[in-house]
């Protein structure tokens, strides 16, 4: 029976996602050492029991090394340094990266004799705090069995989808849906408001209906009260829609709805709307509809707490 201290964990990346994920492992009693490029951002994790290290190289001898940074280039950079002089038993890479990047990483780790799981995640920092993060995982089944208890501790569990980079495709499909759904949610919310009803009333109906979901519910406070503090940036979402379109081209699948959503997002980014949450698509939709957007100032639940 595996205990929480069986494996020595290493963690690279304490951004919005990585911080909240590592915090759950630390609070769960794991032996975890964390590195972040901007060290100060990781330091509060020490209160939860994590050790914050100064150098990436200090993580090279951990048993399982988790990575949660931004893009594939960043993953390559941090792992190149972390594995320069030593090697962990296993790398669990959780950032949202391409199929090709993930395959390149698998090759690199194989040549060093390091096991590799591709384990992208679904949920934002608030979702993690609510204990509802999920993972989709691919790679050797035996490696998955070793990492599973730690993945479970970060949320509601994981789905193992097979060998190789299959989980990357699952995650890309998932985030394509995220982009398309938020764009559509913004369109219909602006339509409902322009027709004369308050946003909170429309979304209350939608969330109670069969079309409501955990996602539409937890985005509702942002759309109702225009709280666009960032959970996921427009540029990171654009990256995922681009990954989806690349995969569509690779596998010969037309993706017309994704394509137009990507262009709408690009228009928003091109107008300089880059620093707030991706749900500022609502503001762009309102502007394009000649609707003056003001907060409803109504308390609404997010379905998470
Ligand atoms: N936010 C979401 O809702 C969400 C959900 C699921 C998956 N994801 C995916 O999860 C990943 C992280 O997203 P996030 O929202 O946590 O992003 P974030 O808040 O911007 O954090 C990015 C992290 O990567 C580090 N980093 C970036 N480039 C680096 C480099 N070259 N060298 C070293 N460290 C580097 C940053 O370090 P610094 O602190 O020094 O900048 C930070 O720790 C992305 O792949 C994203 O697509 C995000």
Image: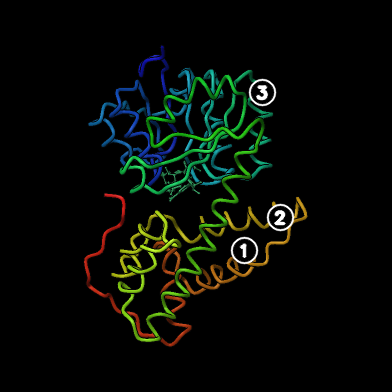
Q: Residue at x 48, y 83 (%)?
A: 288
Where does the N terminus fall, quadrant-wise?
Answer: top left
Above/below status of 158 relative to 239: above
Residue denoted by label 1: 258
Q: Helix or strand or loop: what does disc 1 sit on?
A: helix
As measured in the structure, the alpha-carbon distance from the residue carrying label 2 to the one carrying label 3 is 28 Å
Percent position (x, y) of residue 11?
42, 30
Residue denoted by label 3: 110
Percent position (x, y) of residue 7?
42, 17
Q: Helix or strand or loop: what does disc 3 sit on?
A: helix
Q: Are marks 2 and 1 in contact (CB under 8 Å)?
A: yes
* Closer to us: 91 or 79: 91
As measured in the structure, the alpha-carbon distance from the residue carrying label 3 to the one carrying label 1 is 34 Å
Distance from mark 1 CB to nearest ligand 1 atom below 8 Å: no
Within-10-Å neighbours for mark 2: few <14, some 14–19, many 20+: some
Marks 2 and 3: which is nearer the front?
Answer: 2
Who comes first in sequence, dot 2 or dot 3? 3
Above/below status of 200 relative to 35: below
* Closer to us: 146 or 73: 146
Q: Are marks 2 and 3 in contact (CB under 8 Å)?
A: no
- Residue 190 location, quadrant: bottom left
Residue denoted by label 2: 248
Percent position (x, y) of residue 73?
59, 43
Within-10-Å neighbours for mark 1: few <14, some 14–19, many 20+: some
Who comes first in sequence, dot 2 or dot 1? 2
Q: Helix or strand or loop: what does disc 2 sit on?
A: helix
Marks 3 and 1: which is nearer the front?
Answer: 1
Q: Residue at x 48, y 61 (%)?
A: 234
Percent position (x, y) of residue 283?
41, 75
Q: Residue at x 66, y 42 (%)?
A: 99
Who comes first in sequence, dot 3 or dot 1? 3
């Amino acid at each position: 029976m595996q205990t929480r201290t069986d494996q020595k964990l290493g963690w690279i990346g304490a951004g919005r996602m990585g911080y909240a994920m590592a915090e759950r492992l630390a609070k769960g009693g794991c032996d975890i050492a964390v590195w972040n490029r901007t060290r100060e951002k990781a330091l509060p994790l020490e209160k939860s029991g994590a050790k914050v290290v100064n150098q990436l190289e200090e993580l090279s001898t951990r048993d399982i090394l988790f990575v949660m940074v931004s893009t594939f280039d960043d993953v390559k950079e941090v792992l190149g340094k972390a594995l320069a002089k030593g090697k962990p038993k296993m790398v669990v890479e959780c950032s949202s990266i391409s199929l090709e990047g993930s395959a390149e990483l698998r090759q690199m780790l194989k040549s060093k004799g390091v096991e590799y799981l591709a384990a992208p995640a679904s949920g934002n920092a608030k979702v993690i705090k609510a204990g509802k993060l999920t993972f989709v995982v691919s790679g050797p089944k035996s490696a998955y069995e070793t990492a599973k208890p730690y993945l479970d501790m970060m949320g509601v569990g994981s789905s193992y989808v097979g060998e190789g980079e299959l989980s990357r495709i699952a995650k890309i499909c998932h985030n394509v849906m995220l982009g398309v759904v938020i764009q559509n949610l913004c369109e219909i919310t602006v339509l409902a408001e322009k027709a004369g009803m308050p946003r909170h009333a429309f979304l209350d109906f939608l969330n109670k209906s069969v079309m409501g979901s955990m996602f539409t519910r937890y985005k509702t406070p942002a759309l109702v009260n225009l709280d666009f503090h960032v959970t996921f940036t427009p540029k990171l979402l654009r990256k995922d829609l681009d990954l989806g379109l690349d995969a569509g081209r690779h596998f010969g699948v037309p993706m017309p709805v994704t394509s137009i959503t990507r262009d709408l997002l690009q228009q928003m980014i091109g107008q300089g709307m880059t620093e707030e949450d991706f749900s500022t698509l609502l503001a762009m939709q309102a502007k394009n509809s000649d609707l003056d957007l003001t907060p409803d100032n109504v308390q609404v639940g997010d379905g998470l707490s």
